[in-house]
Amino acid sequence: MNILYCGDTNMKRGLLISILSLLKETQEPLHITILTAFMQNDARKFYPLSQQTVTELDALVKRANPQNGVRRVDVTALVAAMPPSANLNTIFTPCCMLRLYADQVPGLPDHLLYLDTDVICRRNPDYFYHQNLAHVELAGVLDHYGRWFFHQSWDRFDYLNSGILLLNLPEIRRTRLFARSRQLCQNREMFMPDQSALNQLVTHKRVLGRQFNEQRQLRPDTVFQHFTTSFRLFPWLHTLTVKPWDVDEMHSKLKLHEYDDILNEYQKLIFNL
């Protein structure tokens, strides 16, 4: 199973939890690639995930299965050649756009599962991962809120959440989906820039069931749970953001203990990364 993560040095906590969940639920070998880069905007600098952290993660996954592996690809040069200039100063970290450079990275497998680092695998994803993507650029799940506001028409709910995507890289290269998305991010400021670009420009996609990217609350059939920001009505209308590494808030605010075994392991390991 070929997995792709993207981010900077701040991704360590979520990355560890997400990988631990995959190790628990997946029996086949995991080949994990992490795209990282140095980026900066007007307010701050974003530094690449260190090779030392990746070496520790590689040793961790190999203890579970010697065929597993984690590798790091620094794409700073690719980003510098075509930076997402118009979106460097949005409220979203510019590192989320690193996935748009995957088509330029030599050696990436054709069939690839992209995961945000706030995603936990809850059930075996083999059936989901191994679906045929012939003539499809990417496959994903509707965005819980965005489907109501950014769909193309009232009878076509098609706005995908980009936190979990099955990618067909040869088709993406053929249609230049990522190349055109990079160009759009360079020239036009957008809300949720990379997700907006992909949804605007993709021509061949597959919409999958919510169990493969559950963004709201845990359900019996959930395969991947994605800890996004949600709106809550009581006791007043407000947003709620709890990430998996916020262990106390996972318990106190979400009342969620489903992943305590993974989180306990995470707390033992995180200080070594």
Image (cartoon, rainbow, N blue to C red):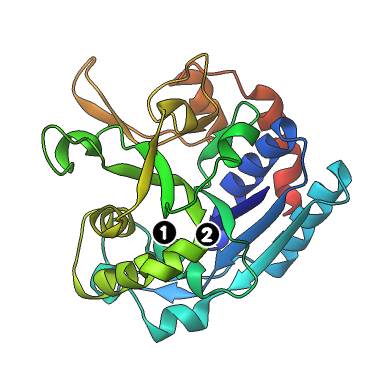
Q: Amino acid at mark 1?
A: Cys
Instruction: Tell me if mark 1 has few (under 14), some (14-19) or many (20+) residues whose alpha carbon lies within 10 angstroms of its own.
Output: many
Q: Which residue is mark 1?
A: 96
- Secondary structure state at the residue bearing disc 2: strand
**Quarter of the image where one finds residue 121:** top right
- Residue 251 seen in the current view: yes
Q: Amino acid at mark 2?
A: Cys
**Quarter of the image where one finds residue 263:** top right
Nearer to us in this view, 178 or 175: 175
Q: Earlier in the sequence, mark 1 or mark 2?
A: 2
The residue under the point 37% across, 35% down is 241
Residue 158: image location, x then y, percent: 26, 40
Q: Is residue 150 above or below residue 230?
A: below
Residue 147: image location, x then y, percent: 23, 36
The residue under the point 61% across, 48% down is 15
- Secondary structure state at the residue bearing disc 1: helix
Q: Is residue 20 left or right of residue 92?
A: right
Nearer to us in this view, 202 or 141: 202
Residue 34: image location, x then y, percent: 61, 61
The residue under the point 57% across, 54% down is 112
As measured in the structure, the alpha-carbon distance from the residue carrying label 1 to the one carrying label 2 is: 7 Å
Q: Is residue 16 above or below residue 169?
A: above
Q: Which residue is mark 2?
A: 6
Tag 1–tag 2 contact (CB < 8 Å): yes
Instruction: Tell me if mark 2 has few (under 14), some (14-19) or many (20+) residues whose alpha carbon lies within 10 angstroms of its own.
Output: many
